[in-house]
Image (tube, coloured by chain):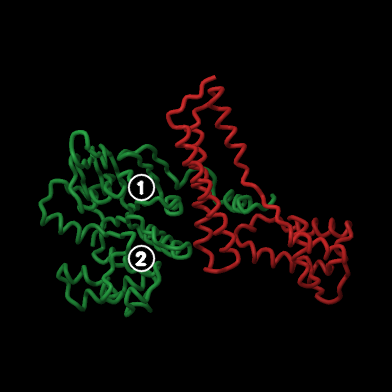
Amino acid sequence: MNKTNESDGAAPLLRARGLSKHYGKDASLVRAVDGVDLDVDAGETLAVTGPSGCGKSTLLHLLGGLDRASAGEIWLAGQRVDEMGERALARLRREAVGFVFQAFHLMDELTAVENVELPALLAGQSPRAARRRAAGLLERVGLADRAGFLPSALSGGQRQRVAVARALVADPLVVLADEPTGNLDSESTLDVLRLFDRLHEAGQTLVIVTHDARIAATADRLISMRDGAFVDQTRLTGGTGGTGGTRGSLGALAGLEG
Amino acid sequence: MQQEVVLAMLAKEPSHGYELRARLQQALGPAGDAMNAGQIYVTLSRLEKAGLVSCEQSAGLPDRPDRKVYALTASGQRRVADWITDTTWPGPGLAEFHLKLIAAAAARLADPLTIIDAQRRELLRSLRDTQRAAMAEPDRSDAALLLEGIVLRLQADLRWLEACERHWTGRKDQP
């Protein structure tokens, strides 16, 4: 369960160069992703934002091996992803990458714990080991008491936390999340943000594609995307001010006089 | 601290200053952390001078430094009633930033898009700090509700910055 290859040293966990995805051709050519360079460090939380149709979901699919690039190179932990055959790619998706989607994508007829253990069973783990792992992950996302519930009996935020637990079942190198709070109310959004925050503190690498500023603001780094290309990068951690100024500014933001 | 807020807190029952302060801190949560301990007493003494509250020395609690109990006067009660029905709402102060962009573009002081980017970074940092505070609050607490309001307001401001960016992209307002 090595998170990173020690010999990699300071090399980024996930790297893309000249990454492109084009649809159609000639006059109707659509450059969904257009020559993007990207480095994600191990343990980093990166948010990619932009208007719908800017190519951010396509980028995520390319990075996770759900879709093939038209051009460019992708490395994950030193391995070339773009040159992998179908079998290697399937294995990568199963073992090295965890996916979280806007619409949860849980199996309606399976309980929470069955949903979480399913990828482990498909990967050949024994039922007992898979169940133990799934139960542990549900506990980690704060849903130990909902293990036997069907998704229909869970709130949106709880369903997304089950989906996050499922994404973690293979102890992936990176979790890729596509609009994870897109279907959630503000309280559930806060639950998911708390969970991502804990994953981040535990050293999990996260790439989150979102138009939700609330998620974007909690990332270490924020990339703005437009028309398939990166237009702005902002580092949000560190930076100006310290915790000292924060408290006072919360009062100012709330409209309290100084 | 706004006078009307302190007055309205007193409407429940006559109270010591420290009791009011504790109730305010409970309601504000982390947003009230920077509140100065003396502020409420300054406000109370102003209200007393204005005849809106009365003050009595209370017996008991010898370990408490302030033994004054404050209560609303009749005119204090009227002021609270007016305040409760008042619908004045603080504006978000958009005009200043709007005019900053206009002036910067017209006099070529700076690229409006650079100003917008810097402002967005600042708002995102404020949003991050507010989210962090909200994540640490129990759900449905009074303080969490206030933090949610700050978050929604910042989100609205960020959306306006997106509109600003679209407006100023590719525009060359030259004098």
Task: Locate the N terminus of chain A by quadrant.
Answer: bottom left
Q: Residue at x 62, y 54 (%)?
A: A254
* Residue A160 image label: 2
Depth check, front residue: A174 or B62: A174
Label 1 secondary element: loop
Left or right: A181, with A76 as reference point: right
Left or right: A171, with B9 as reference point: left
* Residue A170 image label: none
Q: Residue at x 38, y 74 (%)?
A: A154
Supply the letter of whichever chain is green: A
Residue B36 versus residue A36 in the image, above or below: below
Circles 2 and 1, Cβ within 8 Å, touching? The answer is no
Residue at label 1?
A: A52
Q: Give the residue furthest to the top.
A: B175
Depth check, front residue: A142 or A192: A192
Disc 2 versus disc 1: nearer the observer: 1
Residue A37 versus residue B77 in the image, above or below: above
The chain identifier of the residue carrying mark 1 reads A
Do tags 2 and 1 sit on the same chain?
A: yes
Q: Quadrant of residue B33?
A: bottom right
Locate residue B5, reporting x and y percent: 74, 60
Task: Please tell me the colour of chain B.
Answer: red
| Sequence-first disc among 2 and 1 | 1
* Three-letter amino acid code of the residue under disc 1: Ser
Residue A20 versus residue B142 in the image, above or below: above
Q: Give the residue furthest to the front.
A: A27
The chain identifier of the residue carrying mark 2 reads A
Depth check, front residue: B62 or A98: A98
